[in-house]
Every structure is written in structure tokens, then in C-alpha cells.
């Protein structure tokens, strides 16, 4: 017995409806996947935006660190200028001492031994000053090289530990310079 037209039509309609339902389910799953992908993309873009903001903040921090380093260099330049002025004062003092010794020599022709002792003392003072000057210059050169190495480190790492070490070393240099100034005065 065969199917009637009505049954055949009903069967075809059922198959078509089932296929439409299946297609509708697939479309819904596709919509869900697209929505999920859209949400994930938005989250990723938000993360990327946050990373860019963090990078911008890091660059601002690096700029501030460079400004701090520039200020330290300015301080060091001023300190070195003060040292130069102290040495000029010492030179003037030594020159003044030399003139006094010459005056004393003219006034005290008979006291030649005292003059020789004073000249010997001046030579020692001058030798000590020149020796200390060489030491300070060498120390300043070493510090300059270390500071340059710290700058390179800052450029590479962008962290603040080298900046702290630089500040400590600058303070130590200033202390040594002050000790030298007291020693010379």
C-alpha cells in the first residue's frame, strides 16, 4: 500500500520543518559563537588598550627618571664648579704664601734655614694638593663612568633601583669632596 498524497505531503512537510528547525538551531549556535567571538575580541582590545596605557605610563616614568638624572648631573656640575673654585682659592693662598716668603726672605737675609723649611713645607703642601687633585679627578672620572653605566641600565630596564644607587654614590662623592675641602682648608 502506498502513501497517499496527503501522507506524502505531510511527510515532506515534516522533513522540511525538521530541516528548518535544524537550520534554525545551527543559526542560533553560529550567532552564539559570533557573539562569543565579539565579546572575546572586545576583551582583547580592552586588554590591548590597557597595555598601551601602561606603556605610556612607563614612558612617563622613564622621562621623570631622566629629569632626575639631569638634576643630579646639574648638582654634580655645581659641586665640581665649587671644587674648582676651592682649588683656585688654594692657588691664590699658595701664591700669597710665596709672596710672603719672598718678603720674609728680603727682610730676613740671615734666616736662610727657616726659609728652606718653609719652602719644603710649601712643596709638600703643593705635592699633597696635586696628589689629592689627581685622586679627586680619578674618582670623578670613575663616578662619571659608573653614572653612565647606570643610565644605560635605566634605559634597558626602566627600574628605579639604579636611580637609588646613583643617588647614594652621588652622596658619597659629595662627602668625599667635603672631606677633601676640610683637609685642604
Image (cartoon, helix red, strand yellow):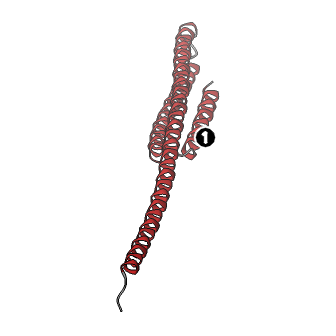
Residue at 50%, 30% (x, y): give it.
133
18 lies above or below 122: below
- Residue most extreme to the bottom: 1
Quadrant showing the C terminus: top right
Residue at 45 percent across and 69 percent down: it is 21
- Pick whichever, 140 or 117, lies toward us: 140
170 left or right of 138 in image:
right
With respect to residue 67, does 91 lie above or below? above
Q: Residue at x 47, y 49 (%)?
A: 45
Residue 79: where, in percent of width, then height?
56, 26
Where residue 39 appears, as percent x and y from the top left, is: 51, 54
Q: Which residue is mark 1?
A: 168
Is 28 or 137 nearer to us in this picture? 28
12 or 109, nearer to the observer: 12
Q: Which quadrant holds the N terminus?
A: bottom left
Badge 1: residue crowd in 10 Å (few <14, some 14–19, many ≥20): few
Residue depicted at 57% across the width and 36% down the height: 170
Using residue 89 as the reference point, say whether residue 156 is left or right of it.
left
Q: Could you tell me residue 112's position as x and y percent?
A: 55, 18
| Residue 19, placed above or below residue 184 | below
SS under mark 1: helix
Looking at the picture, tell me which residue is in the foreground, 64 or 179: 64
From the top left corner, tell me how far across and down residue 7 is, in percent. Answer: 40, 80
Number of numbered markers: 1
Amino acid at each position: 500500500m502506498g502513501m497517499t498524497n496527503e501522507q506524502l505531503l505531510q511527510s515532506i512537510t515534516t522533513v522540511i520543518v525538521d530541516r528548518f528547525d535544524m537550520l534554525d538551531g545551527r543559526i542560533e549556535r553560529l550567532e552564539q559563537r559570533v557573539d562569543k567571538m565579539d565579546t572575546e575580541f572586545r576583551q582583547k582590545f580592552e586588554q590591548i588598550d590597557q597595555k598601551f596605557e601602561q606603556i605610556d605610563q612607563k614612558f612617563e616614568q622613564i622621562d621623570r627618571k631622566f629629569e632626575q638624572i639631569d638634576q643630579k648631573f646639574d648638582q654634580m656640575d655645581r659641586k665640581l664648579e665649587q671644587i674648582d673654585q676651592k682649588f683656585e682659592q688654594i692657588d691664590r693662598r699658595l701664591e700669597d704664601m710665596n709672596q710672603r716668603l719672598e718678603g720674609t726672605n728680603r727682610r730676613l737675609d740671615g734666616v736662610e734655614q727657616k726659609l728652606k723649611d718653609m719652602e719644603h713645607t710649601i712643596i709638600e703642601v703643593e705635592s699633597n694638593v696635586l696628589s689629592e687633585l689627581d685622586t679627586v679627578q680619578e674618582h670623578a672620572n670613575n663616578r662619571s663612568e659608573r653614572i653612565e653605566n647606570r643610565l644605560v641600565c635605566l634605559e634597558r630596564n626602566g627600574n628605579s633601583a639604579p636611580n637609588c644607587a646613583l643617588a647614594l654614590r652621588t652622596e658619597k662623592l659629595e662627602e668625599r669632596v667635603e672631606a677633601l675641602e676640610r683637609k685642604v682648608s
